C-alpha cells in the first residue's frame, strides 16, 4: 500500500515484504473498476519493436518487454476502502487509483486540449510537438510509465511519449534512500551549505545513468575540493591577478599562438564536441568527464608556461599569450558547464566580463561548442568561485545533516603512525629495462580505459574464437565489441560481467563486423580470463 503498487507473490521478500521499502504488503479485497490492460499486451510489444529506444537503458527495456511478454492482467483503477483522492466520475463512492490520475498529470499540467482563449500549451508541447517527449523517472516506477501509461494513451487515442529514461537509486550503504526506510539525507541543509549547483554536479558526476549510486559526504567534499575548487576555481584564480597587475584589468588579445596554445585549443574543441554528444545521448556523467579533461589540460598548460615566472621577469608579451588562451578556455568551459551549474557558469562569466548565457531557441538549446570573444573584456574579480571546504566547514555540514563526525585520533595513535612512517625506507629493487623500453606517464594517459558492463553476447558465425558483445560504457547506446574469448566463455556466462575496455581504440573490422573497442584479458595454460573489479561500479567509469 505504501508505494501504491500491485505486487506478485514471487516479487516479495521473505515475510511478504515489499522489495523496495522492506514493509509488509497487505492483501486488500474491495469493489473496483478495472482497465483492460490485458488487451494491450500485443500492441505494446508491437510498439516496443517499432521503437527500440523507447526505454533507456537497454537492460531496463529488456525487463519491461519480458514482463509484458509473460502476459498482462487487467488493472484495478479505483478504490473504495478509503476516500482521499479524486472521485471517479459518475460513481463518487470510488476514488481513482493513484497511478491512473498521477500519470495524466503530464497532460493536465499543460492544460489539456486548449479551450478558446487559453494558451495551447498541450498542443504546443505534446499533441503537435515535433520535438521529443522524454520522461525521466526512477527505476522503481518504470513499469507504470513504460507499460500502464502507453496503454492508457493508446486507449484514449493520444500521442505516446518518445522515450522513458529510468535512472537508478541514490543509496545509503547499498539501500535505496527513502523516507519510508528513514535513511534519507535531507537535501535542503545540504544544498544550503554547498549550493544547488554543486549538489547537482556531484550527483551527475558520481552516478552513471541507469545505475545506483551510494551517497557519501566524503566523496562529495573530495570532488568539490579536488575538481571544483582546485580544478576549475583555481584555474580562474591563476590568471585574474596578472590581468589586474599587468593589463589594467582588461583581458589581452591572443597573438602569436604557439604549439602549446594550439594544443590546448584543440583539446577544448575535442572536449566540447564530446560533451555535446554525451549530453544529447543523456549520459551527463560522461559529458562532465569530457569537460574536466579540458580543465585538466588548461591547468597543465599553466604549469608548463609558468605565468608567475613570466610576470616576475616582466615578459609581458608571453604572459599576455598565456592569459588570453586561458581566458578563452574559461569562457568556453563556462558554456559547457551551464546546463549542469547555471549559477556557477554565470558567476564565472561575470568575473571574465562576459554576458550571461540564455538558452537558445530550437534543438541546440545549450551550444557547448560556441566561442566567446574575450579580448578587451574588463574582468570583475569577485569572491572565490568554489571556496574550499575545510575541516570546520565539513563539521558544520555533518552537523546539519545529522551525521556524527569520526572521533579525532589520540596523540598515542598519531605518534604510532608517525613512528611507522619514520621507519619506512625505499625498498624498490633494481629492475632490468623492459623489452621495448619504458613509456612516459603521458603515453599511458593516452589510453582511455573504461569499466564496461556486458549486456548482450552471441557467437560470431564461422568463428570458434569470437563473441560479439554489446558493452554498456555509460554512453547511452552500448558498443559492439568483438572479443576472442568464445573458447573460454559462453554468451550466457559473460552477460552481466563487468570488464575493462580500451575505449579509444580505433574501430576495426573482424569477420565483417565493426569492433568498437577491446576487452582486456589475461591468459595462461588454462585459457583466458577477463579483467574485472571487485565491487559494483557504474559503467563508463574511467580506469586509472
Image (spheres, rainbow, N blue to C red):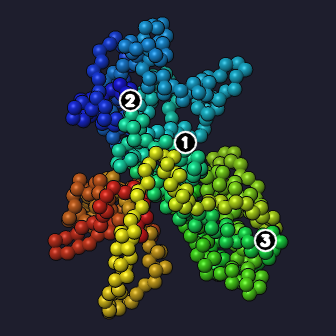
Q: Alpha-carbon neighbours of circle 2 within 10 Å: few (<14), some, or many (≥20)? A: some
Circle 2: element type: loop
Q: Is residue 484 above or below residue 438?
A: above
Seen in the image, is 465 located left or right of residue 317?
left
Q: Alpha-carbon neighbours of circle 1 within 10 Å: few (<14), some, or many (≥20)? A: few
Q: Nearer the viewer, residue 320 or 267?
A: 320
Q: Nearer the viewer, residue 338 or 404?
A: 404
Circle 3: element type: helix
The answer to which of marks 2 and 3 sits earlier in the sequence is: 2
Seen in the image, is 297 located left or right of residue 455?
right
Q: CA distance from mark 1 to mark 2?
A: 24 Å
Q: CA distance from mark 2 to mark 3?
A: 59 Å
The answer to which of marks 1 and 3 sits earlier in the sequence is: 1
The answer to which of marks 1 and 2 sits earlier in the sequence is: 2
Label 2 sits on residue: 3
Q: Nearer the viewer, mark 1 or mark 3?
A: 1
Q: Alpha-carbon neighbours of circle 3 within 10 Å: few (<14), some, or many (≥20)? A: some
Q: Which mark is residue 188?
A: 1
Q: Nearer the viewer, mark 1 or mark 2?
A: 1
Q: Which mark is residue 212?
A: none
Q: Are marks 1 and 3 in contact (CB under 8 Å)?
A: no
Q: Is residue 52 visible?
A: no
State which quarter of the image contains the C terminus: bottom left
Q: Residue furthest right?
A: 248
The residue under the point 35% across, 30% down is 42
Q: Nearer the viewer, residue 61 or 216?
A: 216
Amino acid at each position: 500500500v505504501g508505494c501504491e503498487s500491485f505486487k506478485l507473490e514471487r516479487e516479495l521478500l521473505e515475510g511478504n515484504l515489499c522489495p523496495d521499502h522492506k514493509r509488509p504488503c497487505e492483501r486488500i479485497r474491495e469493489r473496483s473498476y478495472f482497465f483492460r490492460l490485458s488487451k494491450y499486451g500485443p500492441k505494446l510489444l508491437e510498439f516496443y519493436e517499432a521503437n527500440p529506444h523507447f526505454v533507456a537503458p537497454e537492460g531496463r527495456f529488456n525487463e519491461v518487454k519480458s514482463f509484458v511478454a509473460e502476459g498482462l492482467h487487467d488493472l484495478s483503477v479505483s478504490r473504495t476502502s478509503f476516500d482521499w483522492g479524486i472521485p471517479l466520475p459518475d460513481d463518487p463512492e470510488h476514488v481513482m487509483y493513484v497511478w491512473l490520475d498521477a500519470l495524466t498529470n503530464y497532460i493536465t499540467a499543460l492544460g489539456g486540449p486548449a479551450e478558446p482563449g487559453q494558451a495551447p500549451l498541450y498542443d504546443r508541447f505534446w499533441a503537435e510537438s515535433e520535438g521529443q517527449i522524454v520522461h525521466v523517472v526512477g527505476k522503481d516506477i518504470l513499469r507504470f510509465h513504460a507499460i500502464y501509461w502507453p496503454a492508457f494513451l493508446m486507449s484514449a487515442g493520444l500521442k505516446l511519449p518518445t522515450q522513458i529514461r529510468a535512472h537508478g537509486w541514490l543509496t545509503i550503504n547499498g539501500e535505496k534512500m527513502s523516507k519510508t526506510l528513514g535513511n534519507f539525507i535531507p537535501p535542503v541543509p545540504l544544498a544550503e551549505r554547498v549550493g544547488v549547483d554543486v549538489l547537482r554536479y556531484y550527483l551527475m558526476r558520481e552516478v552513471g545513468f541507469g545505475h545506483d549510486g551510494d551517497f557519501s559526504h566524503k566523496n562529495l567534499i573530495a570532488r568539490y575540493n579536488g575538481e571544483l575548487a582546485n580544478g576549475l576555481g583555481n584555474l580562474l584564480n591563476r590568471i585574474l591577478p596578472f590581468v589586474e597587475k599587468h593589463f589594467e584589468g582588461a583581458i589581452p588579445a591572443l597573438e602569436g599562438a604557439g604549439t602549446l596554445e594550439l594544443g590546448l585549443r584543440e583539446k577544448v574543441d575535442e572536449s566540447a564536441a564530446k560533451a555535446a554528444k554525451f549530453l544529447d545521448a543523456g549520459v551527463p556523467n560522461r559529458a562532465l568527464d569530457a569537460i574536466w579533461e579540458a580543465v585538466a589540460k588548461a591547468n597543465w598548460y599553466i604549469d608548463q608556461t609558468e605565468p608567475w615566472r613570466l610576470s616576475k621577469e616582466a615578459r609581458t608579451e608571453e604572459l599576455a599569450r598565456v592569459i588570453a588562451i586561458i581566458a578563452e578556455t574559461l569562457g568556453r568551459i563556462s558554456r559547457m558547464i551551464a546546463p549542469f551549474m547555471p549559477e556557477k557558469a554565470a558567476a564565472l562569466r561575470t568575473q571574465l566580463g562576459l554576458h550571461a548565457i540564455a538558452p537558445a531557441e530550437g534543438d541546440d538549446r545549450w551550444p557547448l561548442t560556441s566561442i566567446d570573444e574575450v579580448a578587451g573584456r574588463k574582468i570583475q574579480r569577485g569572491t572565490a568561485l568554489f571556496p574550499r571546504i575545510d575541516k570546520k566547514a565539513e563539521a558544520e555540514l555533518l552537523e546539519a545533516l545529522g551525521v556524527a563526525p569520526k572521533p579525532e585520533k589520540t596523540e598515542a595513535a598519531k605518534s604510532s603512525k608517525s613512528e611507522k612512517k619514520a621507519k619506512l625506507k625505499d625498498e624498490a629493487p633494481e629492475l632490468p629495462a623492459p623489452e621495448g623500453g619504458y613509456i612516459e606517464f603521458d603515453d599511458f594517459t593516452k589510453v582511455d580505459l573504461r569499466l564496461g558492463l556486458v549486456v548482450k553476447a552471441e557467437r560470431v558465425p564461422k568463428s570458434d574464437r569470437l563473441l560479439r558483445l554489446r558493452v554498456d560504457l555509460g554512453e547511452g547506446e552500448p558498443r559492439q565489441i568483438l572479443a576472442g574469448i568464445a573458447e573460454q566463455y559462453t554468451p550466457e556466462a559473460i552477460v552481466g560481467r563487468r570488464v575493462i575496455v580500451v575505449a579509444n581504440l580505433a574501430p576495426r573490422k573482424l569477420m565483417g563486423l565493426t569492433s568498437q573497442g577491446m576487452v582486456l584479458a589475461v591468459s595462461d595454460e588454462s585459457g583466458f580470463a577477463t579483467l574485472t573489479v571487485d565491487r559494483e561500479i557504474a559503467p563508463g567509469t574511467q580506469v586509472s
